[in-house]
Image (tube, rainbow, N blue to C red):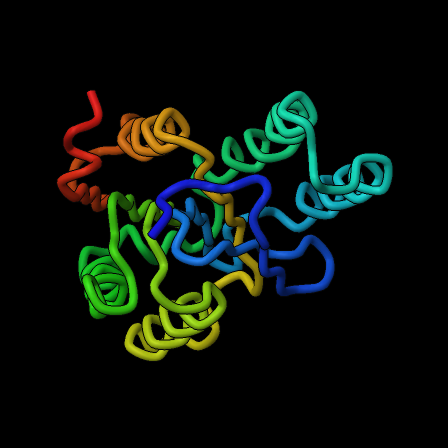
Amino acid sequence: MADFLNEFGEILKHGSKLPHWQQGEVMQFVTFRLGDAMPATKLRQWKEERAMWLSVHPKPWTPEQEKEYHRRFTWKLEGWLDEGAGSCLLEDPGHRKIVEDVLMCFQGVRVEHHASVIMPNHLHVVFTPGVPLETLMKAWKGTSAHRIGQGRIWQKNYRDTLIRDAGHFANAVRYIRRNPVKLREGTFSLWQGPRAIAVP
């Protein structure tokens, strides 16, 4: 089993607009959010700018292009998410506990979790998938929404990144740790497995 991306290996893709990538059991860093977590006008402008950029810079990207993409789009979106827009259903400890239980349900069987943080309106997860990524996402979103009982709470899509190497893994873990630093205690849930805990 390979932990990290093999740039010469086969990559399975699913989804139409910006395909989700999976390479066997290579680690993934996934972000998904509540459906109302992003103001519609901001999101529309972001999507238009990103579509224009992607039309000129199709994948696979050079390391420089990937950095530019994250600077222009990923981190802008993450900043908006951290502003805490929308209903923030996951600020409620009971709702977060449901999401935690759903995420960890198949730990060690269908998935190996390494680190996660559940924020008031989104979450980040680093894990090794044992089944297709879309299967995990469908189960996590569908089951948690059903148990929370407030209809379709999640954004339709999600953002996934294959972990390239040990340094990338360490950076993802540190990002997860830092994500809730401005939040008050009791409004988020941070979890780390042994590999994440070992990251300084």
Identified at 19% across, 61% down, the residue is 97
Relative image position of residue 110 (x, y in whole percent)? 29, 68
Image-based side of 134 in relation to 140, left or right = right
- In the rendering, at what x and y percent does residue 137 appear? 43, 66
The relative height of residue 89 versus residue 38 in the rendered view (above or below) is: below
31 or 87, which is in the foreground?
31
The quarter of the picture where the C terminus appears is top left
Between residue 65 and residue 33, name the one nearer to us.
65
Q: Is residue 140 left or right of residue 64?
A: left
Above or below, 153 relative to 24: below
Image point 28% across, 44% down: which residue? 117
Q: Position of residue 89 (x, y in %)?
A: 35, 58
Q: Residue at x 80, y 35 (%)?
A: 57
Q: How many marks?
A: 0
Q: Quadrant of residue 41?
A: top right
Q: Position of residue 101 (x, y in %)?
A: 19, 65
Residue located 37% across and 24% down the image: 167
Residues 200 and 147: in front is 200
Q: Quadrant of residue 52?
A: top right
Classify residue 184 by image quadrant: top left
Left or right: where does residue 135 sit relative to residue 173?
Answer: right
